[in-house]
Image: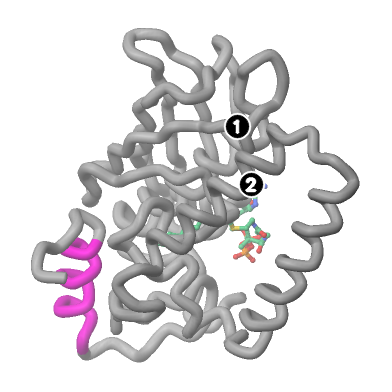
Amino acid sequence: MTQKSPLQKTATSFAEESADEPHHEGGFRPDFDIDLTRGGPRYGEFIEEVRTFMDRVKAALPSEELVAEVIDELKVLNAKLDEVAIDEWRAPSGGRIDLPARGNITLPPYEVDDAGEEGVHARLTFRRYHLGGNNAAHGGQVAVAFDDLMGMAGALGSKGITRTAYLTVNYRAITPLDTELKLRSWVDRMEGRKVFLRATLHNGETLCAEADGLFIKLKPGQP
Ligand SMILES: CCCCCCCCCC(=O)SCCNC(=O)CCNC(=O)[C@H](O)C(C)(C)COP(=O)(O)OP(=O)(O)OC[C@H]1O[C@@H](n2cnc3c(N)ncnc32)[C@H](O)[C@@H]1OP(=O)(O)O
């Protein structure tokens, strides 16, 4: 990859600034040795196929025969993937910052447009597998998106790794599926290790949800 994403640029500059500092082994382990080759050039396509599979499962009314066939095929694939299972630090999932939601299938697939100390801007389209009811996104999925983006904004704003102490979400309007939404998070204020963050989710001019949270900057070695 020749062009750096906004998050990668920021991570690289932090790596240069913190080159002389001891390696932090706690929290989400900010290992700045970012390797975007893990999983190969088609890893993003692989993750997208898994997401599409979840969409199809959520939407399907399969026959007994099709259920049996899919189970058999999944068993084969699961056995193949089981052979290449690795610890969380070296798996590409969550570390491929060039991909939507860093290639993590359990996160809503947001795409970061801008990330820095002043905050993070992202685009997010919820889809069938995020369905709560009546074509609206599940509230828990909205909270997951906020938690992750706020964690990122907290890390960039505080130049440390933070964990969520509390997260309050206010749902203001239905969050539609299959619609590109704008997600934003920023540090409101910091008091020592306490990082107070805010976040919003908009559909055009409509505020779908907003959040405020307290994230605590972790001490070296803190889990
Ligand atoms: C670029 C990478 C991006 C990655 C993004 C990933 C984002 C994902 C974020 C998560 O989901 S993290 C997982 C969910 N969170 C947890 O599992 C955290 C579980 N809780 C803990 O580990 C600890 O309770 C915690 C680290 C949050 C705080 O423990 P500490 O021992 O470090 O701090 P302490 O308890 O001394 O509190 C520090 C200050 O915060 C305050 N505080 C802590 N929890 C609070 C709370 N819940 N409400 C209000 N204040 C709170 C506390 O009163 C104190 O205030 P003062 O300094 O003024 O005395």
Quick check: is 11 in the magenta stretch?
A: yes
Of the numbered discs 1 and 2, the one sitting upstream in the chain is: 2
Where does label 2 land, which residue? 54
For badge 2, the amino acid type reads: Met
Q: Which residues are magenta?
A: 8-19
For badge 1, the amino acid type reads: Arg
Where does label 1 land, which residue? 128
- The N terminus - image quarter: bottom left
In the depicted structure, whether residue 197 falls above or below residue 73: above
Q: Left or right? Give the position of 9 relative to 84.
A: left
Q: Position of residue 199 (x, y in %)?
A: 43, 32
Mark 1 and 2 residues: CB-CB less than 8 Å, in contact? Answer: yes
Q: For this rendering, which residue is in front, 78 or 25?
A: 78
Q: How did the renderer colour the structure?
A: one colour
In the depicted structure, whether residue 114 falls above or below residue 142: below
Q: Find numbered disc 1 in the image and state the secondary structure of the residue it sits on.
A: helix
How many other residues sit within 10 Å of disc 1, few (<14), some (14-19) or many (≥20)? some
Q: Left or right? Give the position of 192 relative to 53.
A: left
Q: Report the number of discs.
A: 2
The answer to whether residue 44 of the structure is visible from this angle is: yes
